[in-house]
Image: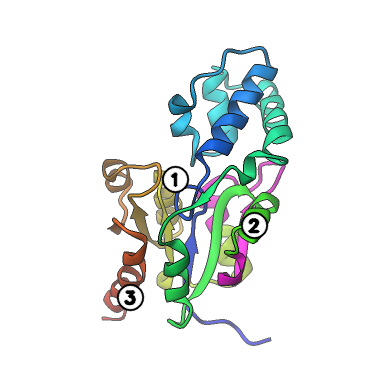
């Protein structure tokens, strides 16, 4: 099999391609209530979209030990796997942007901290899977939920060249993970991280609209080549 030398463009999912607010926040509330806790309002859980779920539950449960967050994740999945993953919507402009990448000579790869099995269901449900050459996410046991670990895994599994790759995401975790692997990054402003968060994490570019992404990737490619 010949090596695929096309530059890799890695896309985060939550907040970057889809808006999962309702499904994630309601499933977190469900998990906390099953544990006998008073759940915050959904708007107070916006920050939970992006970081690994175990970190969110450690904060919400005010603990650093593993047992209670692990149980919370099991309760979360009771609701999320049946209802929550489809309480979601594709962000305006994303399908057209992915179409625009189709003939530009890039290899598109999903890179999300969400479990891969859920990610595949969501991509299929919203007819996004056909745009991607590969889909990578975390495992249900928590492996690769950290974005740096996930990107490192993708580089090895997909033989991606870090120096020509780009990570696109809406939270600092996407940018920090890219930087840890010497991958260029584009922070997006339509998700759950703001400009200050993305700039502080040292994003190489900031995109204000999905349709701006191909031009950003092309200009970064030209800068590397130059």
Sort mark 2 into few (<14), some (14-19) or many (20+) by Cα contacts within 10 Å: few
**Quarter of the view holding residue 130:** bottom right
Q: Quadrant of the C terminus?
A: bottom left
Q: Which residue is mark 2?
A: 125
Q: Which of the numbered marks, if any, corresponds to residue 138?
A: none
The residue under the point 71% across, 41% down is: 81
Q: Which of label 2 and label 3 is nearer to you? A: 2
Say which quarter of the image contains residue 126: bottom right
List the residue tagged with mark 1. 173
Q: Is residue 219 visible?
A: yes
Query: Residue 135, percent across and down?
Result: 62, 62
- Give the CA distance from mark 1 to mark 3: 23 Å
Q: Is residue 162 visible?
A: no
| Secondary element at image label 1 | helix
Between 59 and 11, the one lying in front of the other is 11
Q: Position of residue 11 (x, y in %)?
A: 48, 60
In this view, 75 is above or below 160 = above
């Amino acid at each position: 099999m010949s090596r695929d030398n096309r530059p890799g463009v890695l896309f985060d999912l939550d907040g970057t391609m889809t808006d999962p607010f309702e499904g994630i926040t309601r499933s977190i509330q469900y998990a906390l209530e099953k544990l006998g806790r008073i759940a915050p309002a959904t708007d107070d859980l916006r920050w939970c979209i992006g970081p690994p779920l175990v970190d969110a539950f450690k904060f919400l449960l005010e603990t650093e030990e593993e047992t209670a967050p692990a149980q919370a994740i099991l309760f979360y999945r009771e609701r999320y796997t049946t209802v929550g993953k489809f309480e979601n919507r594709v962000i305006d402009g994303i399908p057209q942007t992915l179409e625009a990448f189709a003939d530009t000579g890039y290899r598109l790869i999903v890179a999300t901290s969400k479990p891969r099995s859920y990610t595949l269901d969501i991509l299929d449900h919203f007819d996004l899977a056909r745009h991607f050459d590969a889909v990578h996410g975390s495992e249900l046991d928590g492996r690769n939920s950290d974005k740096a670990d996930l990107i490192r895994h993708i580089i090895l599994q997909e033989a991606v060249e870090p120096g020509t790759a780009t990570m696109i995401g809406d939270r600092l975790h996407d940018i920090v993970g890219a930087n840890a692997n010497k991958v260029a990054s584009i922070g997006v402003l339509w998700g759950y991280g703001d400009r200050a968060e993305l700039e502080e994490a040292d994003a190489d570019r900031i995109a204000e609209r999905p349709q701006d992404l191909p031009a950003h990737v092309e200009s970064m490619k030209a800068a590397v080549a130059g």
